Amino acid sequence: MGRCPKAMAEPTLKILGLAGEYRASSKSGMLVNEALNMAAARGAEVVFWDLAAQPLPLVGEDGCWSHPNVKAFQSLLETCDAFFLSSPEYHGTMSGVMKNTMDWMYDKHVGGKVFGLMSTLGGVTNANTLNHMRIALRWLHGWPVPEQLAVGHVKEAFNDEGHLNDPALRDRLETLVESVLNTAQKLRA
């Protein structure tokens, strides 16, 4: 009997986390990092773009097109297989910080790649921000997975270690992370 050849190991997925706020310790930053930690536990290489350390200029500002942070950001986008995005909801839509971050993405950087979408809200949960992010990503030829997570009453949602308090929300986040990883693996194949 012949021996079966060893199966080739799948290359590690690289996942980038982006928060629509300037602090990694913000609620959106905490949510993105929670998702990244879950992805890392499943073997993914994860990166968080810290806007406090590497701010992106406003699109259209003098010198913005050649800004070194923009070049580094766009280069990183090209190397990633998938993305987790979380934005706070302000006045019924994503934050200006998230919109500006997305404005630096082009389909040559993220087209055909997978996105997991999350939002944080001070009040009750809704899907406005998530829907607006989906619209922008459609124009970039991105593939948001169907699963998504909106965390309402966000001031009470996290414990002191930055983890979600509600087991049902943690389960939904696990499902979102699994969907992103599985879909990214399928699209890469």
Image (cartoon, helix red, strand yellow):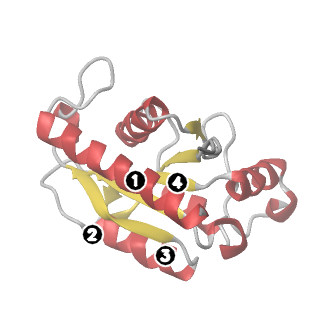
The three-letter amino acid code for the residue at tag 4 is: Phe
Q: Is residue 168 above or below residue 66?
A: above
Earlier sequence position, callout 1 versus callout 3 = 1
Earlier sequence position, callout 4 versus callout 3 = 4
Residue 87 is tagged as 1
Q: Indicate the position of residue 38 as horizontal and vertical percent values.
A: 39, 34
Residue found 87% across the figure and 59% down from its top = 66
- The answer to whether residue 147 is left or right of residue 46 is left
Contact (Cβ within 8 Å) of mark 1 with mark 3: no
Q: Nearer the viewer, residue 11 or 85?
A: 11
Spatial CA distance of label 1 from label 3 is 13 Å
Spatial CA distance of label 4 from label 3 is 14 Å
Asked which secondary structure carries label 2, the reply is helix
The three-letter amino acid code for the residue at tag 2 is: Asn
Asked which secondary structure carries label 3, the reply is helix
Q: Indicate the position of residue 174 as horizontal and vertical percent values.
A: 29, 42
Residue 136 is tagged as 3
Mark 3 surroundings within 10 Å by alpha-carbon count, few (fewer than 14), some (14 through 19), many (20 or more): some
Q: Which dot, 2 or 4, sits closer to the camera?
A: 4
Residue found 60% across the figure and 55% down from its top = 81
Residue identified by numbered label 2? 128
Quadrant in the picture for residue 116: bottom left
Most extreme residue toward the bottom is 139
The three-letter amino acid code for the residue at tag 1 is: Ser
Residue identified by numbered label 4? 83
What is the quadrant of the N terminus in the image? top right
Res 84 seen here: yes
Earlier sequence position, callout 3 versus callout 2 = 2
Asked which secondary structure carries label 1, the reply is strand
Q: Indicate the position of residue 113 as horizontal and vertical percent values.
A: 57, 65
The three-letter amino acid code for the residue at tag 3 is: Ala
